[in-house]
Image (cartoon, coloured by chain):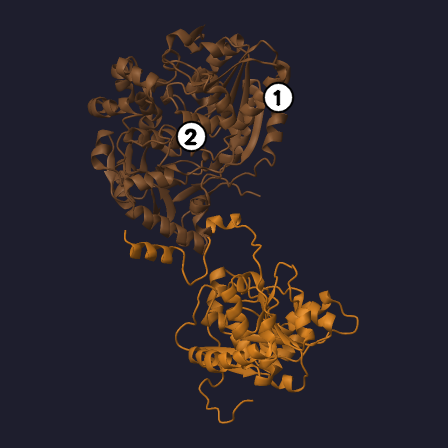
Amino acid sequence: MSLASDLKQVREGWRWGRRPLVPRSAEPYVLPTQKSVFPSDWSRGPAAVAAREIAQKAGLEPLFRSQVRTRVEGLDVLERLEGPVIFAANHASHLDTPLVLLSLPDAWRRRTAVAAAADYFFDTWWRAVGSSLVFNTFPIDRRGGSMATTPGEVLAEGWSLVIFPEGTRSKDGWMGSFRMGAAFLAVEHGVPVVPVAHRGTFAAMPRDQNWPSKGRRQLTIRFGEPLRPAEGEGVRDFAPRIRDGVAALLDEDSSTWWEAKRHAASGTTPDPSGPDVAPWRRVWDQSQSPEADSPRRLRVWQRK
Amino acid sequence: MSRPGFVLEVDDRTPPMIVHEGLGFRLESFPLGTRVVYPPESLPAVPDVDAAIDHALRNPEDSEPLPALLRAGMRLTIAFDDLSLPLPTMKAPDIRGRIIEAVLTMAAEAGVDDVKLVAANALHRRMTAAELKHIVGERVFRSFYPQGDLYNFDAEDQDNLLHLGTTEHGEDIEIDKRAATSDLLVYVNVNLVAMDGGHKSVGIGLASYKSIKHHHNAKTMVHSRSFMDHKKSAMHHSAWRMGRIIKDTVKVFQIETTLNNDIFPKSLGFLQKREWEWSVRDQASMLAVKRGLAMAPQKARHKLFHDVRSVYGLTGVRAGEVEAVHAKTLEKVHAQHSVEVDGQSDVLVMGVPYVGPYNVNSSMNPILATCMGLGYYFNSYRGQPVVRKGGAVILYHPLDEGFNQLHHPSYVDFYEEVLAESTDPAVVGEKYEQQFAEDPWYRHLYRTSHAYHGVHPFYMWYWAAHAMDHVGDVIWVGGDRKAAARLGFRAATTLQDALEMASSTVGPSPSITYLHNPPHLLADVR
């Protein structure tokens, strides 16, 4: 064995440049990681904001648009709103974050931060720096612990937040249960929650894939009417309303606004957690990209 | 908190695994579905070793406290395990030295004058002064060695052996006369693995060939299933019968210690970790060590490995009556080594490391490598062997270290003459054992030099007798072909070749289990 073959064996065996994997049978024995979380406060300073603008506009956006097609609806709700808000979206893929960010009007995008799992995006310095710089992420602990920077502080600084209340990417593309975090922040800080529903990201780039599938898959994203906690409404009552809001938007995205309204009124909005059928059929449904109304329409008017 | 041992099933996410092979290691990619048995992680060590020793001596099991057993004018003998334990050698100070110091402190307070310290090396080689000093510590060494009160046991010194009688099975019990005629015999052991300790300490460590031959033979070893489980080991049954008679003759105060699995120092820390948890630093140091070993001459590789001093933590120390102490000791040993394994497999894979009990500061010759693989590692089970009857064993070792003429002179003749005629343990024992055991030149070298007893290579071969009886095929990966053939086995270049060769015994797609030791493990096969 030469040095080169040794290096090759280690590079492949230990997945250099990719996230290390634990053998399935060893998963019950993985130690809970107590790793340090890298700070991200710097990433909301003026220098980082300027660098991010270049990274997103000159790097991320052309790359993103070269790989997928998008259809964005419902941005008009933002015109009637003042920031900050919480964007609560379903989560099926790593494409979700760039999709939400790049769908936002520039002024909103520049003032929006993304809550990202501390144990996944902030476990090494380069991953922390990379994701903070490009996506404006800040760490949250999905096991309920506390972090150096809390989402409340980021909100208080005037930043809007993107939160995926499911806490993790869906395994089959269907929506999971929502955690309380987004509702808690909205109730605590009195900010509105804008439900966001998107489809197609699971079909374009599911969990185990690290690059979008070929063929510029279609993604759709829809922003809904802001939800505000009612007077005296608790977190436990508000959280299901957010989920219902996202569910109604998903319904609207796949049907029409009117049909979705009627479904909602009669309580027949399709369950976003999907039908109770064999796992393969659930994946099968979701691996189909949504169809946009006119996928190749010419856009004469620049969207603001 | 240390994690328990477990059985990994190799899947597409599993990185290559470390397999030890003598003065080196290789990274092996096992077929998907291979079971890999990992030992438990190191148990937490006792925080205050001296306090633990003092507590054990003052609060023994089924015995009066040690200070109450000591009185002026008595004959006190302290015996201790030799350098075959622990493996690798412990970083100074050795736990035996610390215990002996505590015992001697109490003896001095009680006014005991007649004290002898004897290394219970049985038919092992005499240790050098430096080796003795490492075990007992400088203070004890200085106080006893120059006066001749600290010495190696001599199993061929007929004047200083005492025949204590025979067991109900007609087994002779002949041990060191000084120990047998002492008012108190304190035995300090290191219970590294489950086979050590108990009545094996005095009953074998201080015994002569006349006594040892009753249980160290092919027939007994085939019926020791395994010799790591004293309740199912014919060898231990014999030692226990002897021990109970020794107990009637001499008061034995047994002190047993258990160690955790902290074997490799920081520089070789990757050998201690589970592969998929290697950091970038671990990967880099593995690559550096591997490339360094590939370039280094044998002598340098030998030095690198044999200079390793392990930083074991003490997990427990107990003292008192032999059997009561040993029962508690085994609980600790099992907690550190035991791994539940569900059923047997067709093929058992083991990597033979650079050191075994009989090549400390010496070389791992082909007979010792066989003993290590088919003896110690194969027998590291409770219940039933990890490999099924008639299955195949695949071992990794180059079998190229040759023989140390100082330590293993009788091995050379055993290898060249005895194995050339037969490799059947029962046959060679029947025909040649006595001749080697009584050979005056080997006896002379054992008594005056640093040679293992003439009969010792036979014992190594008997150690492997159970495995040879049980399995259908033994293949050495990376082994010297001539040496493997002399041992009665076959050699292969790679694991794939070995599996191909074994397919005539176990079929084309056998179930495979790899024992990932060292660190030490004991497979509890259900």
Q: Label 2 marks which chain's residue? A: B
Q: From the top left corner, tell me how far across and down residue B238 is, in percent.
A: 43, 15
Observer able to see residue B515:
yes
Q: Quadrant of residue B68?
A: top right
The residue nearer to you, when weighing A258 against B128, is B128
Q: Is residue A79 above or below residue A139?
A: below
The answer to whether the residues at label 2 and label 1 have Cβ atoms under 8 Å apart is no
The chain drawn in orange is A
Q: Secondary structure at mark 1?
A: loop
Answer left or right for B103 relative to A213: right
Identified by mark 2, the residue type is Gln
Q: Which residue is mark 1?
A: B60
Q: Secondary structure at mark 2?
A: loop
Answer left or right for B478 relative to A214: left
Q: From the top left corner, tell me how far across and down residue A295 is, in percent.
A: 46, 84
Q: Which residue is mark 2?
A: B384
Near mark 2 (Cα within 10 A), the count class, few <14, some 14-19 or many ≥20, is some
Residue depicted at 61% across the width and 14% down the height: B111
Residue depicted at 47% across the width and 27% down the height: B135
Q: From the top left corner, tell me how far across and down residue A271 is, in percent.
A: 60, 68
Residue depicted at 67% across the width and 84% down the height: A81
Count the labels in the image.
Answer: 2
Answer left or right for A19 relative to A264: left
The chain drawn in brown is B
